[in-house]
Amino acid sequence: MKTANYISASCIISNQVVYKNGLPVFEDNKPDASEFLTAAYRHFDLQYPKFFKMDNLSKLGLLANEILLQGSFDKEMYKPEDVGIVLSNANSSLDTDIRYYETTKTMPSPAQFVYTLPNIVIGEISIRHGFKGENAFFIFDDFDAVFIEQYVSNLINNNILQCCICGWVDVLDGTYNATLFLIEKDKSGNSVNFTKENLNKIYQLQNG
Amino acid sequence: MSDLKSQIIAQLNLQDTKPEDIGDDQPLFVDGLGLDSIDALELIVLLQQQYKIKLSNAEDGPKVFKTVRTMAEYITAHQAQNA
């Protein structure tokens, strides 16, 4: 059984900066999370109007995923069932839960209610790209590279997945952080070994 | 109808759409403006919030929300009833 897998690409969105493979690719000083994410959406010319209807968690995850895959992912190499998504965060969908709760005091918003689960961001990414592989969303206190490495390796090494988008997507009270990794079986140009050390190294590069 | 279009855009967060982009008789769902079932619920909320109209019969939904014109006619009819 083949056990070595590779981090083909990474994307971090945090503190008003977007990084792709460790390099800043977009900066904007808008302090509001939603405004910053919209500015990034327009900068990367995503052309996906549904973006505007999403909550901040889904906007963040979708945006990070688009930038992660742009120029780094060959969709033709995989069947829809081959590509999975494993995400995690500390605050679940609390940011939206609070906003939705506020609307219940007057008129509950159906559009906000549908985002009161953290795994909706996985659904949004899957719909956008047609991914149908295994997926899961975990809640941890902090980014857990050990767990991510073990869980995703297990899925890939047992041929449940051939490729996995994984990492951390968290939003609360205007603070946001997405750190996504593209994990594949084959080594490519700039890929590094899929290890907990490399996950932590990339995560800490921009997140301290 | 221009006001109604602006209200629809605001309620549904259609940020890249202008009132003039929506035709009076353009279908709101599927091949037209591409709205979905959650948007339909938001349109019901819009009627309640802006016009104090409760859509009592869910089966009326497809007829009422077919186009901006059908929505406007429904609102006008209800306002006339309650005048």
Image (cartoon, coloured by chain):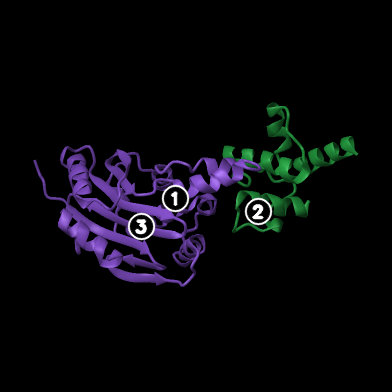
Chain colours: A purple, B green
SS type, badge 1: helix
Tell if the residue under mark 1 belongs to the same chain as the one under mark 3.
Answer: yes
Q: Position of residue A117 (x, y in %)?
A: 44, 41
Q: Is residue A122 left or right of residue A49?
A: left
Residue sitting at 41 percent across and 59 percent down? A176
Q: Which residue is mark 2?
A: B10
Q: Is residue A51 left or right of residue B73?
A: left
Mark 1 surroundings: few (<14), some (14-19) or many (≥20) residues within 10 A: many
Residue sitting at 41 percent across and 72 percent down? A27
Q: Position of residue B37 (x, y in %)?
A: 58, 37
Q: Which residue is mark 1?
A: A58
Tell which tag, 2 or 3, sits nearer the viewer. 3
Q: Position of residue A1 (x, y in %)?
A: 8, 40
CA gap, disc 1 to disc 3?
Answer: 11 Å
Residue sitting at 45 percent across and 47 percent down? A94
Above or below, A61 against A84 in this view is: below
SS type, badge 3: strand
The amino acid pointed to by label 1 is: Ser
Q: Position of residue A131 (x, y in %)?
A: 35, 43
Residue B38 can be seen, yes or no: yes
The front one of A56 and A23 is: A56
Q: Which residue is mark 3?
A: A178
Tell if the residue under mark 2 belongs to the same chain as the one under mark 3.
Answer: no
Q: Which chain letter goes with mark 2? A: B
